[in-house]
Image: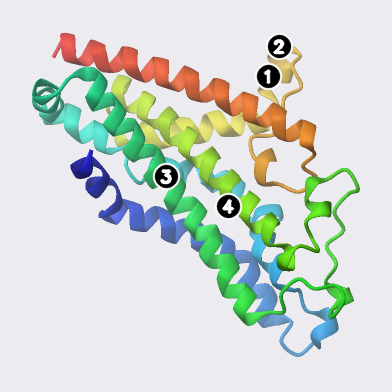
Amino acid sequence: MKEELKSAFVSWRFALAFAVMLTCFLGYSLPSWIFSADWGDEFREGALQLSVGGIFFGGAMLLLPFCASVPHATSQVDEIRTSYLNWKVIRSSVGHYAACKVTATMLSAAAATGMAFAVHALVWNNIAYPYDLAAHPYQEVPFGPSCIYAQWTDVCYALPIYVWMAGGIALCAAVWSVTALAVSVWVPDKLLTITIPVCLCELWSCRIFYHLFGLNVPHPAALYNDALTANEARRSLCMYGLLLIASLIVYLLGLRRRVQHA
């Protein structure tokens, strides 16, 4: 496990995923801050708006599956192509190997994406005014009355909102990384390992479940998007739970097939 975690976190792929996600967040906040430099405080966005704007109005939703697949899921392709997979399985077992690979993949994907959001939020809370309507009423973010964020805006400068969103991003990324891992063991191609989860996420975003089966499921980014209600959070967690279970089953079946027919 220690070697697997080191391989996942100490790599250029992890740094790339973190950099891409952070750049995506900055793609909204940095121009907004620079272009409003001479507008006066009452017209500039606060720390909360700058921190979450990349999610609501940027490309974070589209890039999340990509950044989740890059850190470690593609390493499975290298191990299959070099037959290193068989050597590692002989040293332990299929179950132990799968547990180490899945754990390292999920943790690295969660860290690369969730940490990017956390660092971005920390930067803007030190540059812009923290969310405090008593001192800066013009900073108000109009969350709906049923939105869970509306109850947290007055708590520690909206700290619970940052924590929830970082956790939601990390959780979704972790699940998408297992989906990428499942793809890699059946189709050992790095490009497809990254592309297929992105395509699946895009189909989900386009309401493929409704058009095919008449099921109205939450958006894949609902867990960290605006207008999130308690009911939507539960439904979204169920959907990601089902995706995780399906991905794990597909991965284990593919892994056993690879080991038996190497």
Farthest residue in the front direction?
155
Q: How is the image coloured?
A: rainbow
Instruction: State which tag comes first along the sequence, 4 or 1.
Output: 4
Who comes first in sequence, dot 2 or dot 3?
A: 3
Q: What residue type is labelled 1?
A: Phe
The span from disc 2 to disc 3 (Cα, nearest Å) is 31 Å
Which is more foreground, mark 4 or mark 2?
Answer: 4
- Estimate the x, y position of residue 14 in percent, counting from the top left: 34, 52
Query: Which residue appears at 80% of the width and 39% of the height?
Result: 229
Alpha carbons under labels 4 and 2: distance apart:
32 Å
Tell me the quadrant of the picture where the N terminus can be found. top left
- The Cα–Cα distance between marks 1 and 2, rounded to whole angstroms, is 5 Å
Residue that numbered label 3 is attached to = 109
Which of label 4 and label 1 is nearer to you? 4
Residue assigned mark 1: 209
Q: Is mark 4 on a helix, strand or loop?
A: helix
